[in-house]
Image (cartoon, rainbow, N blue to C red):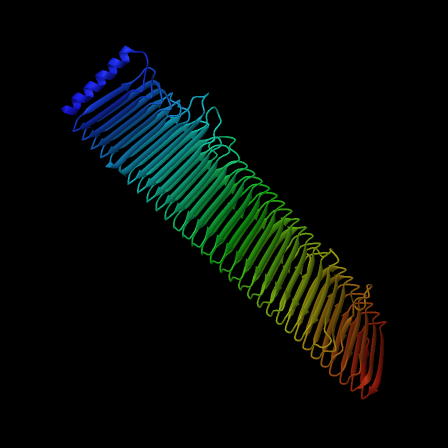
Amino acid sequence: MKHSKIAMLISAALLASSGASAASIDNNATVTQDGNNNAVTVNQVIESNNNQALVDQDGNHNAAQVDQVNSNLNIADVQQSGNRNSATVSQVDVTSASSSITQTGNGDTALIENTDSDSAFATVTQHVGQGNDAYIDQTNSDAALANLTQSGSGNDADIMQSTASNGADTTVATLMQTGNDNVALISQTAQQNTAISTQTGNRNDSTIYQNGDNGVGQNLATVTQTGNANGSYVEQLEMNSATVTQMGNGNYSEVLQAENNTAIISQTGNNNESYVDQADRSGDEDNLAIVTQLNGNGNVSDVIQEDRNQAFITQENGNGNESYLNSDDDNITYVTQKNGNGNFSDIEQDDDNSLHVYQGGGNNNESWVDQDDDNTVSVTQTGGNGNFSDIDQDDDNSVTIVQDNGNRNSSWIEQDDDNTATVIQVNGNGNESWIEQEDDNRVFVAQDGGNNNYTNIVQDQANDAFVLQLDGNGNESNIDQDSANQADVIQVNGKNNYAEVSQGLSNTVFSLQINGNGNESSIQQGSLNAADVIQDGNNNSSSVTQDDQQTVHLVQTGNGNDTTVNQVSTDAALVSNNADIYQDGNRDTVAVNQNGLGNDVLVMQDATSFGNSITIDQTGLGNYAGAGTFSGAGSEIFITQAGNNNRVSNSDTDRDIGATSTGSDNTMYIDQIGNGNLVSAESSHNGSLVDIDQNGDLNFADVDSTWGAENQLLVSQTGNSHIAYVTATGGTMNYTNITQTDMSNTAAVTQVGSNNSVMINQGAM
């Protein structure tokens, strides 16, 4: 009871003082209470300057209230020790006021109100307690400062600050909590707000609201949380900066900002989530978001932006992390995911964006990108296996994908018109690249230093496709193009590689396979196309299928190579296919099939090769075939022409060779059905066979054999007005047989040598 009487005397004295004079200065009120259920009220009002109110209570269920009104340079200090105590300090229209409440215990309540109090400084400290509540309200108070500290669990702290429109427009709030299940709230409205929230413990929540005054703001929010399952929420408007740092597991951070803002989020631990929305209002632009998540698994980052923003997202040393970004136009974005497996990145953007995605040192990572027009994308996945990249773009975009030092990586690109795509896969096996484009696109794919890699490209019109596969075996390239496209496939230093190109109208293809064995090239083209194929190695195979008015140029170097060319039109009246084939090696095989008008084929096999085979089949009018195995031995030539005015001879271009086989034990079969056909054949050396069969009228055969023995030259002509010239010089035991059926035929044989023989049969049979 002693302390209660003192409190009553002080309160009465203060009231008497206020009633005796309209203004007083330098007043001091000191109250000390020891016990429970005590109460004290101190009133210092009406232009009372330089006043002090000091209250000290020790016990439970105590209450203290200090009111200071319409005064300057006042100080209020309340200290309470015990449980379920309450303290209130109200300073109204007080300039440069200082207020503090210190409480030690559980279930305490602290309230400081600064109203219309410029340069007010409020401090609340609650020690080692649970279930405490602290509230600082600074309204219309320019240049206000608030500090609030709580240690314990289940505590609740609020700081509310606002400034007058014509004031200094600056506030500062600092809030610190240590313990579990605490809640912190800071709300500020001014041109220059600063909020600092620090929490140590688990399951804590921090919320910061900052808003510029009269549409202008330069707010700064800093949140630091150490522990698990903590949550942070920051909302800012107008030129703000928010920094959130969370260390622990299962934490959540959310930042909402409008125009000209910066958000910096740092999270360390597992299963953390970060959400940044810088598109909270229409016209939100020029924002910066930096999100860093380290040393944890299952983290999630989500960023939303509108125009002219920048975002930097980093997730390191963790597995199963996810990154999401959605933005509109003219943004710059960097996503980095390092040293983790199963990470995921998903980006959605509109136009004129620049995006860079890096996933390094991990397996089974995924990157997804969806953009509209005029974007630039770079995706790098390095040092991991089973990584996946998917990009979907509209028009005028540029994309580069790099996947290196990993196996079974996959890349998918889908683009509309006027795009550029580059895919590089290095030092990995079983990698795949899939590209689908519409018109006027360009694509480059490089797969280097790996086996069993695969490329698939589908394009519509006026596209360019270039595929480079180096230093690997079992690689495969597939290109499907519609019209007016260019396709280039280069496979170097590898075995059993496969290149396939399918094209429609007016396309060009170049296929190069060198320094490898067992490679295969397959080309299918429609009309008005051109194909160039070069293969260097053994047991390579090339297949070209074309419609009308096509050109194919094919070169094979090596042994056991095989070439098949089909230039066959669905309309036999279409014209002018051309095939040039050159082989340098042994046991090579060529088969050419043409139909239509004015087709042209030339096959040449190296003079030193042997055991080769040439088969040419032409159907139509005015076709040309030239085939030469030259001085190699054991080779075969088969030529069949059906139609009129076909020839196996020198053509008008003087580039061809007729049918030439100048080695030993070579065989030549030429069969022509039609009128006005021409054959010019040359054979030499020993044991060779030339067999010419012409069926029709007005056909001509010219056979020349030199410097050989035991050669057989056979000419059979069925019909009228045929001419056969056979010359065999410089050999022995050569045999010539000419058979001409019907009338007006001419046969002339010249032999120089010994033990030769000739048989000519003319007339109806």
Reply above or below: 409 against 375: below
State the image coordinates of residue 522 (x, y, percent, origin top left). Answer: 62, 62
Which residue occupies 45% across, 41% down?
A: 264
- Toward the bottom, the furthest residue is 755
State the image coordinates of residue 185 (x, y, percent, origin top left). Answer: 35, 32
The N terminus, quarter of image: top left
Image quadrant of residue 471?
bottom right
Of 300 and 727, the residue lying toward us: 300
Reply above or below: 316 against 137: below
Image quadrant of residue 525?
bottom right
Reply above or below: 620 against 65: below
**In the drawing, does residue 246 fall left or right of residue 85?**
right
Which residue occupies 63% across, 61% down?
A: 490
Which residue occupies 68% across, 52% down?
A: 505
Q: Is residue 39 visible to us here?
A: yes
Q: How many marks?
A: 0
Which residue occupies 29% across, 30% down?
A: 134
Of 76 and 187, the residue lying toward us: 76
State the image coordinates of residue 295 (x, y, percent, origin top left). Answer: 40, 51
The C terminus, quarter of image: bottom right
- Toward the left, the furthest residue is 1
Image quadrant of residue 110?
top left
